[in-house]
Amino acid sequence: MEGSRRRRRKEVLPRAPAWWWWTWVVLLLSMETRAVCALDMWWQLGVSGLEKWKNPQLFILGAQPTICTQLKGLSARQVKFCQQYHDHMPSIGRGAKMGIGECQWQFRLRRWNCSTVQDTSVFGPLILIASREAAFTHAISAAGVVHAVSRSCREGDLSSCGCSRARRPKDLNRDWIWGGCGDNIEYGYRFARAFVDAREMERNHPRHSRDLARMLMNLHNNEAGRKAVYNYAKVECKCHGVSGSCALKTCWQQLPSFREIGDRLRDRYDGATEIRFNKRGTKLVRKNKRYNKPTKEDLIYLDESPNYCIANPETGSLGTAGRICNRQSQGMDGCNLMCCGRGYNTFKQKLTERCNCKFYWCCYVKCKTCERVVDVNTCK
């Protein structure tokens, strides 16, 4: 009797319906796909992926649409841009590469040194955190595209643009000629805005959602990067005349150097504004009203930066152990700050370099080879 009762009890235990299990499977797969998509970035073009475009057969056989779908890091809209403006892709790749290189230069002496990783995210899990660092990477990458495309127009590499058609500055000497082949910053700005922001505009997000906040943050920082190029164009002139008399000048519009752009955005990084949603959950406003309202050129962020002192694969931090530091410096490159109070090791290193160079007429330089021993300090 007891055995039959136990069997009856087992038979009446409720079973989860089949649709419930399938729902969980779909949910888990969608979460995994979302995480992968969040890490796929077009910045990958600056690391690899453009070698295929160097093959001249592509332009003969018309294979560009197929190549566009094979490039890693592009969103669906960016793939369409690639298919429509395939000759722009090498310029976009150069712009991304410029942005990554400038990021590493600007932060070479800081705890976060803008290191890259070997995947399509380029910067690793760091970009999933809406921090100052993510804000800078978006800005400097967008600036790189503006700079590279604008210069490519001037050099005649693109079919849809040429030299700049900017109007003559009002304060330019009326005796000087305006019309040299300048950098087409207007076209570079418009194209960069369309291509870079396309990734953010592909989905609609509900109010007060984290995804909406991150989308608005990325769009703002992308624009800040573009403004760092567009708003600081220069007027360059060349003298004409007998023996350099400069009786006549020809002037044109020219891009600022990318180092100037990097310096400007690094300053914006240091003064970035923490933001939050407004009451309606549709716009981002500054979190602390005591600070000035961020302009279109300022960087904004949602989250505090992770701890870059210790390696943490979840946040993308590589830590500072083994980093070279300057024990005589009181700045961020100093051993006290760089090593986060852990101390440092010192060892001797022999350097071989050229020295006592002399110029001989005509026309070569002869140098000696010198060796010196220096102290190198690395964080524990």
Image (spheres, rainbow, N blue to C red):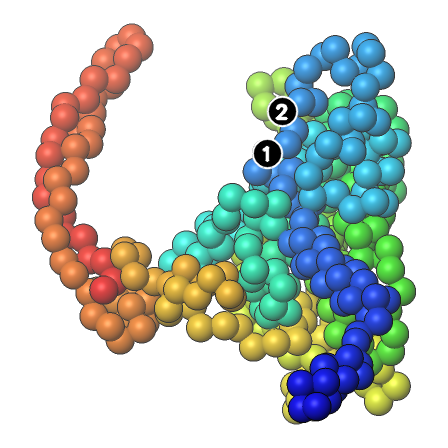
What is the residue that sits farthest to the front in this orientation? 1
Q: Is residue 217 left or right of residue 166?
A: left
Q: Is residue 372 left or right of residue 235?
A: left
208, above or below 176, in the image: below
Label 1 sits on a secondary structure element that is loop
Three-letter amino acid code of the residue under disc 1: Ser
Q: Is residue 48 left or right of residue 204?
A: left
Q: Residue at x 73, y 32 (%)?
A: 70
118, above or below 178, in the image: below
Label 2 sits on a secondary structure element that is helix
Q: In x, y percent, where is residue 273?
A: 64, 77
Three-letter amino acid code of the residue under disc 2: Glu
Q: Residue at x 14, y 58 (%)?
A: 346
Q: Nearer the viewer, residue 8 or 259?
A: 8
Q: In x, y percent, where is residue 365?
A: 25, 17
Residue on which the image places disc 2:
51
Disc ID at residue 73: none
118, above or below 240, in the image: below
Q: Nearer the viewer, residue 173 or 314?
A: 314
Q: In x, y percent, where is residue 165?
A: 87, 36
Q: Residue at x 58, y 41 (%)?
A: 98
Can residue 280 be seen from the camera position used here?
yes
Mark 1 → mark 2, Cα distance in angstroms:
7 Å
Pointer 1 and pointer 2: residues touching (CB < 8 Å)? yes
